[in-house]
Amino acid sequence: METPVLHAAILSSPGMGHQIPVLQLANHLITHHQIPVTVLVVTTHTSPPESHPATASSSNLLRIVQLPPVDVSSLLDPTATVVTRLCVMMRAALPSVRSALLNSSPRPNFLIADLFGSESIKIADELGMPKYVYITSNAWFACLTTYCDVLDKEVVGQYVDQTEVLRIPGCKPVRPEDVVDPMLDRNDQQYREFVRMGIEYSFFRGILLNTWEDLDRRSVDALRSIANVPVYPIGPLTRAAEPEGTNTELMEWLDKQPVESVLYVSFGSGGTLSSEQLTELAWGLEMSQQRFIWVVRAPVGGHADASFFSSGNGASNGGVADFLPDGFTDRTRNLGLIVPMWAPQMKILNHPSVGGFLTHCGWNSTLESLVNGVPMIAWPLYAEQRMNATFLTEELGVAVRPKVLPMKKVVRREEIEEMVRSVMELERGKGMRERVKELKVDAEKALSKAGSSYNSLCEMIKDCQMRLESR
């Protein structure tokens, strides 16, 4: 029997944080395994097709199908959370997903769905496609997600009110204050959606993770037992550095700074701070007297993820001086740079002058910091970022974090100054820097030919071929 010619379909949910790792997986399958890929991108009315990172590749083996935005206004309460909105959008887009697969020529013969696309499993089964789910985060988060239906039966009351840690078999426990956003309120729709997704992950042929085996072997092994399906750590899949000519003024300024002297400050594509917290952060940076590049977005009220569906679109509200302390830009003119809205993050983190990263701990940003050997100040805002911050500080030892979660209390300027100095100039920062550089080398080994992540993706491809041969 001839070995089937593979053609992947990868389903991506809205949001830069989801689409970037999907595109990187597509590029990996094309570059290293010569497998054609059709990426199905669910778009929104606030993120037009031309803004999607999936448009960035020119490979003739990569086809982008941008599915039309779905109108879910009648299905959602105006106060619905980001997770609820994503789940409802992905569910409403299923007919478009099915139609796109049926009308593709050549038609993809196996499906990889991202973590919010798990309901597409029904379409894969209908079309006889081997199906895999791609959790674009780490193994500890995946363990909590797949085990949540058990916790749902065991735990009485709200998770955040528990006095004991949440125990996951074979895995490090989760502190109640670190649970992911959908677990903050068991009465909210996003919690029910989260439990459903965790159950559905075990119905796929396998789980792909954007991490590598040695980064958190304990959680990877635990996930294999909990989900009872093959687990394939295939990361760290990160985007390449932005092209030359991107923000040349910023890069020229970096070129003039001493090695590892600059702190990069960014809260990702969707994170926002309150006006009070922005003020305290500005004062903390100034008081630290450390060089910095700060990507600033106008403060908004409400949730920390308020910019999720409009990330990268539009301009900041007025000049940055309008919402920073009086005289801040003048006083720090020779110390740092303020960049409105967006900066070439991978290019910055890869620069030898950068020695620290104050980050919201989104998993993409976390991996980008690790693969560039940059220690972190962990400032979690939403989603699974609190778990990521705990992992970085307590397990990996490559970050410091505020004493109290930023979602609970404004972090004051004195503590910010202390954290910045501890990463950038004190002995503690030296130890973190040494550790993160070890992880950088470890990540490179995992992705190299015959490395653990390379082999893991080869195993998934082999499993897929066997499934197709046995049909």
Image: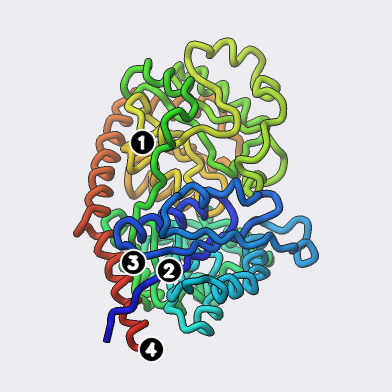
Distance CA(mark 3)–CA(mark 1): 27 Å
Q: Residue at x 46, y 36 (%)?
A: 345
Q: Residue at x 51, y 20 (%)?
A: 337
Distance CA(mark 2)–CA(mark 4): 17 Å
The answer to whether residue 434 is seen in the rendering is yes
Q: Is residue 468 left or right of residue 183?
A: left
Q: Check disc 2 and report the residue beneath it.
A: 8
Q: Nearer the viewer, mark 3 or mark 1?
A: 3
Q: Nearer the viewer, mark 1 or mark 4?
A: 4
Amino acid type for the residue under numbered disc 3: Tyr
Above or below 143: residue 408: above
Res 218 → quadrant? bottom left
- Outermost right residue: 74
Q: Compare marks 1 and 2 and give the one earlier in the sequence.
A: 2
Q: Please, what secondary structure does the residue beneath circle 3 have?
A: strand
Q: Does the residue at mark 4 contact the one at mark 3 (Cβ under 8 Å)?
A: no
